[in-house]
Image (tube, rainbow, N blue to C red):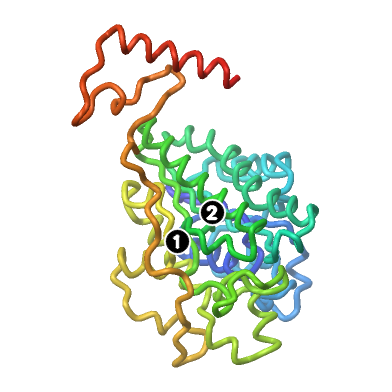
Amino acid sequence: MAPHKEVALVVGASRGIGRQIAIDLAKNEYAVVVSAKTTSNPYLCTPFPPDPNSSASTINTVAREITEAGHDAVPIAVDTRSYDSIQTMVDVAIKRYGRLDVLIYNSGAIWWASVENTSMKRFQLMQKVNPEGLYGSVQACLPHFKANGWRGRIIVVSPPIYSRFFRGKTAYAMGKIGMSVLTKGLAMDFEREGKKGMAVTSIWPATVGFNDTEGSHKGADRQQAIESAATAQISARDASEARDLRRSKVFSDAILAMLRAPTAVVNGLLDLDEDFLQRQCGVTDFSKYSMVEGANPRRIMPERFPSLAVDEQDDEVSPQLKIPESQIKSPGRRTESPGRQAEMYSRLENKKAKAF
């Protein structure tokens, strides 16, 4: 590996969207750590390469595809339900490459059903793989971003936050929205701590769901109208469904564009592949991404999303019990006297003590 080559860790890269992300990163001169749970002997795979959306596609076949094309990749197995497994994955990656520049978390478990029809076992599995797996991956990678002078990118596959997303799939949404909260909160950490070389971003497909009955489908069915292992099952049952699919290239192109964008543009951003490519790269014709030539997969995601900001967005009570400026001095309010400020500090301290 050339000393200047950046290293990208793609978690959930054995097939479908994750495979495409890994391959396109390698084509763009990243050394790629291809990680997921599914492994195999790639030299026993016939035909090769395998159907990218089939179970024959594993981290080993993806890594072989990349290396045989003249690029750099290594497969490392991981079970994202286990933090020890995640830590081992990162340790092996660092031992191999000596650095880490990009983390992409594409691993996910899905079950779309009502609360009544979602067992505790399924709920726990989704939380383990989705928000907990992401949190563990971030925790394991942060020390290496620090060693890199706090320069790095994190891309999370999770949606913008809006209430319709909860409908019919509450258990799944709890985990996925939690992942988006991590994106927002970690971005605030980077900003507050002056880590201007870091950015964390969430991305989600614009063509998502099943018609208007969003959330009525179970784990075997698709979560997004992008070519993937899940959507392949749908197309096999009904070929007309392919007209609503986009190739996974649209997702990887958007991720590459996010990695090239300034950190100030993408830190804390929850965006859609289509919107980011249109706004940041000027893409207006998405026909090249359609699975069926001439088809125009319809957008299911909303055109606009609610702002999560409040008027007091910059106010905070830090561990040092900093008083929010809006409580001390703001337009239309009097400046509190030193005695009043001391009283406010005392009340905050008492509240903090009771909280613990």
Q: Is residue 131 visible in this depiction of the protein?
A: yes
Picture mark count: 2
| Residue position for label 2 | 104
First-in-chain label (2 vs 1):
2
The image quadrant that residue 50 belongs to is bottom right
Q: Give the vertical position of 134 relative to 244 (above or below).
A: above
The label number, if any, that marks residue 70 in the structure image? none
Instruction: Please give the name of the residue rendered at 57% of the width and 71% of the height, measured from the top-left corner.
Output: 224
Amino acid under disc 1: Ile
Q: Give the vertical position of 78 relative to 48 (above or below).
A: above
Amino acid under disc 2: Ile
How many residues crowd mark 2 within 10 Å: few (<14), some (14–19), many (20+)? many
Give the left or right position of residue 2, taking residue 282 as reference: right
Q: Is residue 60 visible in this depiction of the protein?
A: no
| Residue position for label 1 | 255
Q: Position of residue 29 (x, y in %)?
A: 45, 59
Residue contact at pointers 2 and 1, CB within 8 angstroms: yes
Give the left or right position of residue 50, taking residue 335 as reference: right
Q: In which quarter of the image is the C terminus?
A: top right
How many residues crowd mark 1 within 10 Å: few (<14), some (14–19), many (20+)? many
Instruction: Please give the name of the residue rendered at 72% of the width and 72% of the height, measured from the top-left corner.
Output: 220
The image quadrant that residue 276 belongs to is bottom left
Q: In this orientation, which residue lies closer to the viewer: 117 or 20?
A: 117
The image quadrant that residue 157 belongs to is bottom right
Q: Where is residue 107 in the image (x, y as percent from the top left)?
A: 63, 57
C-alpha gap between disc 2 and disc 1 = 9 Å
Q: In this orientation, which residue lies closer to the viewer: 21 or 184?
A: 184
Q: Where is residue 59 in the image (x, y as percent from the top left)?
A: 68, 62
Instruction: Please give the name of the residue rendered at 19% of the width and 31% of the height, measured from the top-left corner.
Output: 331
Q: Position of residue 175 (x, y in %)?
A: 62, 52
